[in-house]
Image (cartoon, helix red, strand yellow):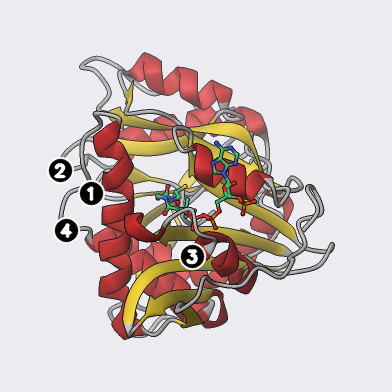
Amino acid sequence: MSPGSASPGSASPPDGISIRAAVEADLPDCERIWRDGLNDYLRRLNQLEIPPENPGLRRLHAHTLATDPDRFAVAERDGRVLAFGSAVRRADVGFLSMLFVDPSDQARGVGRTLLERILPAGAASILGTVTDSLQPISNGLYASLGIVPRMPLFNLVGRPRVGWTPGPLPAGVTIEELATTGGGDTAAPGTVAFRAGVAAEVAALDREVVGYEHPADHAFMLHERPTVFGYRAADGSLAGYGYTSPVGRIGPVAVRDPELLAPVVAHLLTAVEPRGASAIWLPGGAGGAVTMSLDAGLRFEDFPLLLCWSRPFADFGRYIPISPGLP
Ligand SMILES: CC(C)(COP(=O)(O)OP(=O)(O)OC[C@H]1O[C@@H](n2cnc3c(N)ncnc32)[C@H](O)[C@@H]1OP(=O)(O)O)[C@@H](O)C(=O)NCCC(=O)NCCS
């Protein structure tokens, strides 16, 4: 594989290791490898370890396995799973969601072989991922495929300080809730779905701002973070949307005009009072929202992650991704 080409070569797994498509029964093993892989180097860096239970991670794995079953693979030896990788394909963007190798089998080519299996090949594909800034191996491995770290992704956590109020939205912008329980275009009874007509508006905004539409990810998010606000311009068109939830996690957020991003995040910080802290992953490209969040009283949590891509795919001055594992 030549650097920068982002096209696969022909790595093969070390002796005794085979690679196959993942199935749902593999997900507990994937969670174990994820936790062990992270803890192995977080411990050495004197960072806090990953907690034993990660239900959000399990739901993300189940979602990416459901949408991209051909891009979720495990490596095993003698029937024991020792590594896994998952990627999603949205239009011409291939995004590496997860790649983890059991610490005792790292640095032997397993990670590279898994990548070749799950990332789309060919010059037409745009490849992206998010890495830990403290991890030279993953940053080196992905950059060798052209997927180069380009932008920090900050985890901002906390609650607005007492007395802080969000600034005004631009003149003429109005707010409405975009989702409802039952009803909507496609909702089964009891599920949260967009109101009639909204899915098409959201898809059009996503095509413009993110580079692709991703209705399956919105269905996942409506389940995970069921309060989604729409921001309408004076002419009634959808100028932005943003998700929040009582758990405190905010995003994704997309806006047509970059000037709307910070005011929308400010609104989301106060629109739903979470049980604990608010938390939001803000790309460096969303500078105004970063400054606004700090001013509100949120703080940087841990070290930044790094958004990586072979070619640009989303406008991170107008888009806040779902999570580091799903753009
Ligand atoms: C990152 C990880 C998935 C890579 O898998 P792996 O099987 O260990 O990696 P491989 O042996 O296939 O490839 C590693 C590549 O990185 C390169 N590399 C290692 N350290 C490097 C450095 N400091 N600078 C540049 N490249 C480096 C190696 O040379 C190798 O490339 P090569 O195939 O050309 O020799 C694995 O180490 C892991 O699970 N780490 C802990 C968890 C983690 O950080 N996951 C990724 C989160 S972003």
- Asked whether residue 318 is in view, the answer is yes
**Lateral position of residue 272 relative to residue 316, left or right:** left
Label 1 near label 2: C-beta < 8 Å? yes
Measure how far apart labels 2 and 4 are at the Cα level.
19 Å
- Circle number at residue 218: 3
**Lateral position of residue 26 relative to residue 234, left or right:** left
Looking at the rendered structure, the secondary structure element under dot 3 is helix
Measure how far apart labels 1 and 3 are at the Cα level.
18 Å
Measure how far apart labels 2 and 1 are at the Cα level.
6 Å
Q: Is residue 143 above or below residue 100?
A: above
- Circle number at residue 99: none
Q: Earlier in the sequence, mark 2 or mark 4?
A: 4
Instruction: Say whether mark 3 is within 8 Å of ligand 1.
Output: no
Tell me the crowding category of disc 4: few under 14, some 14 to 19, or many 20 or more residues within 10 angstroms, Cα based: few
Q: Residue 316 location in percent, x, y?
A: 63, 38
Q: Of the residues shown, which amino acid type is indicated by label 2? A: Arg
Tell me the crowding category of disc 3: few under 14, some 14 to 19, or many 20 or more residues within 10 angstroms, Cα based: many
- Circle number at residue 275: 2
Q: Earlier in the sequence, mark 2 or mark 1?
A: 1
Measure how far apart labels 2 and 3 are at the Cα level.
23 Å
The residue under label 4 is 53
Q: Residue at x 17, y 49 (%)?
A: 51
Q: Earlier in the sequence, mark 1 or mark 4?
A: 4
